[in-house]
Each structure stands twice: as structure tokens, then as C-alpha cells.
Amino acid sequence: MGRSILSHFFVLSNTYPRSISSLPCGVHLSKCLSRMGAVQQQRRVRRGENFRCLCSVAVSEPSTSATSSSSVKKRIVSGVQPTGSIHLGNYLGAIKNWIDLQNTYETLFFIVDLHAITLPYDTQQLSKATKDTAALYLACGVDSSKASVFVQSHVRAHVELMWLLSSATPIGWLNRMIQFKEKSRKAGDENVGVALLTYPVLMASDILLYQSDFVPVGEDQKQHLELTRELAERVNYLYGGRKWKKLGGRGGAIFKVPEPLIPPTGARVMSLTDGLSKMSKSAPSDQSRINLLDPKDVISNKIKRCKTDSFPGLEFDNPDRPECNNLLSIYQLITSKTKQEVVEECQDMNWGSFKTLLTDALVDHLHPIQTRYAEIISDTAYLDNILAEGASKATAIADVTLSNVYQAMGFLQR
């Protein structure tokens, strides 16, 4: 997606919620629910007030095995919108990380085409863009023998669960979403559909449908994840536990409450024209981003023209040099070098020398991806089969959650 949903990638599990004491290594509680706090939170739910989660969790990317003592793999779900061209920010912030994760986790990667229609879009291009995005997933290294790749709209449970969750979502929760306020202000009220307001509920459906343990998110998605956590707690309280059991269900929590997971590097690649703004498909100037399918001469021209500064030498983490930090970070990520190695190599370079170095690194890294993409996109049957198989696997998982929600909410079972 132009906007990474989920700047979507989610680490999910097949198991149901564990106690706080059993959270994996790397989870640090910055605030804990006291016994009294938990009671007070339940009371607020009973009164129907707009409650918020009273704990916050910071999670570093797991370094331990993704399998539990019972050898059940945890599950990762992530997606990108098929709007515009997938760029370096999408790749380094999400897709590149998927390649390592698919070797350890059960992984599902989808193209979030339903999210792509929340703002005006080209109906003639949506289908093609969806296939192009899927082809790029595979070209970047997603292995269909290890990961399920599918289209969001091909798994109907996403939309059904969204509607059910909408009935339990207070409108005030949606009105406070910063992204909605910003985008609606830019587009104008007459050009904004309800879908832009309810976008976070669909995102919650994407996450909760697969019983997520962790959700890898970018900085701009933190608020949406907070809403997802609150919504999971609310539905669990309103419909789970003994109430669900009385209806013939399993009882207990309906949804697992996900925790945030922010990758240590690559979570936020900035614009080439403004080191303080995120690289984005929606930016009006194509000069602001490196698209994965940009040819060599275009990449070279964009790097030559990208914004820099007049300070001597090159350095990371200087708040007065955001563009310098961004370009060095891109070089570090694209070459898989350590920060210290980049410092030793580049600290005494001038901008001319470094831009040549960065251009060559980008071209060398992206060329195999572009070659593989051309092969995949030309074989329609191959790509269609992968998407159909992925949707089938995802549906089998999603339907279990959806059936439980219908039962817990009191619907007549089929």
C-alpha cells in the first residue's frame, strides 16, 4: 500500500492470551495494572464510559525462538497498500524484515486493497496495482513455500469482523484518531468518506482476526494499535468469559490483546526532500522517494538532487542534520553494515563521494529484485495460483475467529 498498514506488519500467534507473567523476553512493562486499577477499569466498562488501556508495553524485536515449548510457531501477518509504487520506505521498514521472519514464524503477508479505497483512487489501476504489489513481495524474497501471500479482499472475514467490531466501537474513539483529522483536513469534508473514519476498525479486524501476540508498527500507527488493544479488551469484556460460555462457546477471551513491536532499524525511512517527513507514496513529488522499480538513471538523479546540508563530514543522530542521518541510515540498511562500520567508512566523506557510494549500493541491491519482478509479473498463472492458495490458508484461520465472535455476540449459528 502506499501507506503501510499496518506500516502494517504483525507478529501473531496460534495460542490464546497468556498472563502478564508469561510474556516473552523483551517485553518491558512501563506501567502495570494494579489490582485496584484493573477493578476501576472494569467498572468504567460497566458504566459504558470511554475507557483506555492503563498499561503500555515496549517490545524489542524478538531474538529468541518463535516457537513455544509445545513447538507451535507464532504467526506474523503484515501488509502493504497497492496504491502508488512500493518504495524504499515500505521495503526497508517492513518487507525486508519479512524475509528473516518467514524462516522462523508462520507468516501471512497480504495486499491490503480494502484500505486503499479510503481516499480517492483509480478504479482502472487497483487490480493491476494489487498484482504488482504481490509480485514485488515475491521478488523481494517472500517465499511462498514458507509464507502465505494473499489479497485482503479475497478473505471475506476481514470485512465481516470489521462490521461486528464497529458495533462495539464508540464513535469518540475514532474521532480522536490523528491520521483521520490530518487527512480529512487536507481533503475537505465533502471529499472524505466514512471509510477514512472507520479505517482503524478495519485495521483492528486485520490484527484480531489472526489472534496476534505482537504487532510490528511504525510510529504513525501506534495510535491505531492502541485502539485495537482497547477494542479487544472491550469485546472480551462485553461478550467473552462466562457470557460466551452460556451460549455454548469456549469461554474466556475472544481476542488476544496484541502488544506493539517496533523493529530496531528501518521502521521509519524519511523523505529525500525533507529529513523530518516520512518517505511516502502520497507525497506529491516523486523526487521524495526511491521506488523499488526505479531504473538506474532515475535512482542516480534522485540521489544527486536529494536534500543535504553544508556541515563538514557525515554523522548519525545529529538533530540539526536530519537528512544526513536519513541517508546514512539508508546506506546502513541497504548494505547490512553496522552503524559503526558506516561511521568509519563515511565520516570523512564529502557529499559528492557519499552520494556516488549510496547510488551504487542502491542500484546493486535493487537490480536483482527488479529482474525477479519482471519474471513473476509475466507469469500470470503462477502469481494467481500463489494468491489463491494464500487466500485459502488465511480463510481457514480467519473463519475460526469469526465463528467464535458470531457465537459470542449471540447470532443464530449456521
Image (cartoon, rainbow, N blue to C red):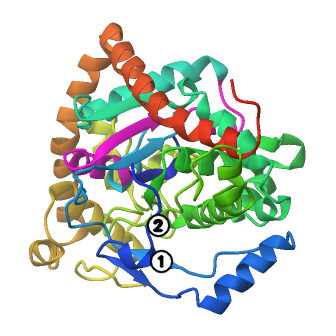
Quick check: 261 above or below 189?
below
Q: Where's residue 59, x and y in %?
A: 39, 73
Q: Quadrant of residue 399?
A: top right
Does residue 233 appear to the left or right of 296 in the view shown? right
Does residue 72 appear to the left or right of 249 in the view shown? left
Residue drawn at 28 percent across, 52 percent down: 97
Q: Please name the residue that numbered disc 2 is placed on.
A: 260
Is residue 130 or residue 301 the one in the foreground? 130
Q: Please name the residue that numbered disc 1 is placed on.
A: 57
Q: Where's residue 35, x and y in %?
A: 61, 89
Is residue 192 or residue 275 the one in the foreground? 192
Q: Earlier in the sequence, mark 1 or mark 2?
A: 1
Quick check: 185 above or below 291?
below
Quick check: 193 above or below 128?
below
Residue drawn at 19 percent across, 46 percent down: 103
- Check disc 2 and report its element: helix, strand or loop: strand
Magenta span covers which residues? 94-122
Q: Disc 2 residue type?
A: Pro
Q: Where's residue 300, x and y in %?
A: 28, 46
Q: Are discs 1 and 2 less than 8 Å apart at CB? A: yes
Q: Where's residue 124, x and y in %?
A: 62, 17
- Check disc 1 and report its element: helix, strand or loop: strand
